[in-house]
């Protein structure tokens, strides 16, 4: 089975045979039974293994289930959305609700595993250095980078996005956030504005994020090194230096606004 999670636009996509699975859409709103829960952390976890228009992405359901089990321990509310439940409307609504519920000074976590794409659209502006918009391949259609930005840029809390998909380096971006400002790895760029954000991606915009039925290599590596209390910076550095990732594509991180890398991961 190919390791590549290569994604192309729908009309040009070569679709693999779909694998049967169960759609799950779950909110976990009671932190009382989770010893590590943080009352002002709100999370959305999305996994699309069988997109109706983008084809099969083996391992995405495993990724989302394992990350859900990890993230929910640190969240007041965690929404898990998979396959047929992962429509653009449902994902945007869930993300917007997390931003609203986190309020002032909390943390919003948005995790995605599945296909990702990079293509020009009729309204793609000149601010896109490569002339393309990046997007997530949801069950029914795509969710573009600037559509994600429209939601998360309204946050008054810190934002953490983790995308294990192809072409994902700037799949969060504002129309005015140019590629030259998306610094790689541990570099920090201070943006004028209130948002404090970390964006972790599995690969650059022009590359692929690899995985198999055992899950995405990026997600597997995050889980491999995670432990309670580990900081964002420490975990990132361990992930970035891991040899199993370096043999494929270098992972990327974008920091915006105030850097909160010294805090415990997911808090």
Image (tube, rainbow, N blue to C red):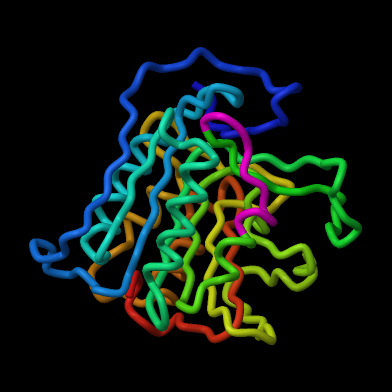
Residue at the right extreme of this rendering? 126
Q: Position of residue 203 (x, y in %)?
A: 61, 52
| Location of residue 256 (image quadrant) | bottom right
User: Which residue is drawn at the image coordinates 48% and 70% (left, top)?
Assistant: 159
Q: Position of residue 78 (x, y in %)?
A: 30, 55
User: Which residue is drawn at the image coordinates 52% and 84% (left, top)?
Assistant: 259
Residue 128 or residue 211, whichever sits in front: 128
Location of residue 11 with respect to 148 vertically, above or below = above
Q: Position of residue 39 (x, y in %)?
A: 24, 73
User: Which residue is drawn at the image coordinates 40% and 83% (left, top)?
Assistant: 105
Is the C terminus in the top left, top right, bottom left or bottom right quadrant? Answer: bottom left
Location of residue 121 with respect to 31 vertically, above or below = above
Q: Does the magenta-highlighted stretch encompass residue 178?
A: no
Does residue 235 appear left or right of residue 149 in this picture? left
Does residue 119 appear left or right of residue 83 in this picture? right
Residue 228 or residue 49, whichever sits in front: 49
Q: How many marks?
A: 0
Q: Position of residue 242 (x, y in %)?
A: 46, 58
- For the magenta stretch, what is the residue range? 139-148
Does residue 64 appear left or right of residue 236 in this picture? left
User: Which residue is drawn at the image coordinates 57% and 71% (left, top)?
Assistant: 154
Residue at the top extreme of this rendering? 17
Q: Does the magenta-highlighted stretch encompass residue 140?
A: yes
Residue at the left extreme of this rendering? 33
Location of residue 109 with respect to 6 vertically, above or below = below
Residue 142 or residue 211, whichever sits in front: 142
């Amino acid at each position: 089975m190919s390791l590549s999670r290569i994604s192309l636009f729908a009309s040009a996509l070569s679709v693999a045979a779909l694998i049967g699975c169960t759609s799950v859409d779950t909110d976990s709103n009671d932190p009382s039974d989770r010893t590590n829960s943080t009352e002002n952390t709100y999370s959305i976890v999305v996994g699309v293994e069988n997109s109706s228009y983008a084809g099969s992405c083996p391992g995405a359901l495993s990724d989302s289930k394992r990350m859900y089990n990890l993230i929910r321990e640190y969240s007041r509310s965690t929404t898990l959305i998979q396959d047929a439940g992962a429509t653009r409307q449902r994902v945007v609504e869930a993300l917007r609700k997390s931003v609203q519920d986190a309020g002032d000074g909390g943390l919003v976590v948005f995790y995605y595993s599945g296909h990702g794409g990079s293509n020009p659209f009729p309204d793609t502006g000149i601010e896109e250095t490569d002339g393309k918009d990046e997007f997530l391949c949801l069950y029914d259609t795509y969710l573009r980078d600037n559509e994600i930005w429209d939601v998360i840029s309204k946050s008054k809390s810190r934002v953490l996005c983790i995308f294990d998909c192809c072409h994902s380096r700037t799949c969060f971006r504002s129309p005015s956030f140019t590629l030259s400002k998306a610094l790689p790895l541990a570099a920090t760029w201070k943006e004028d504005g209130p948002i404090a954000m970390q964006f972790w991606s599995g690969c650059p915009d022009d590359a692929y994020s690899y995985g198999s039925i055992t899950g995405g290599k990026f997600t597997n590596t995050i889980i491999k090194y995670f432990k309670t209390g580990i900081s964002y910076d420490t975990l990132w550095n361990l992930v970035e230096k891991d040899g199993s990732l370096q043999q494929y594509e270098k992972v990327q991180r974008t920091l915006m606004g105030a850097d909160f890398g010294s805090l415990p991961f997911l808090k």
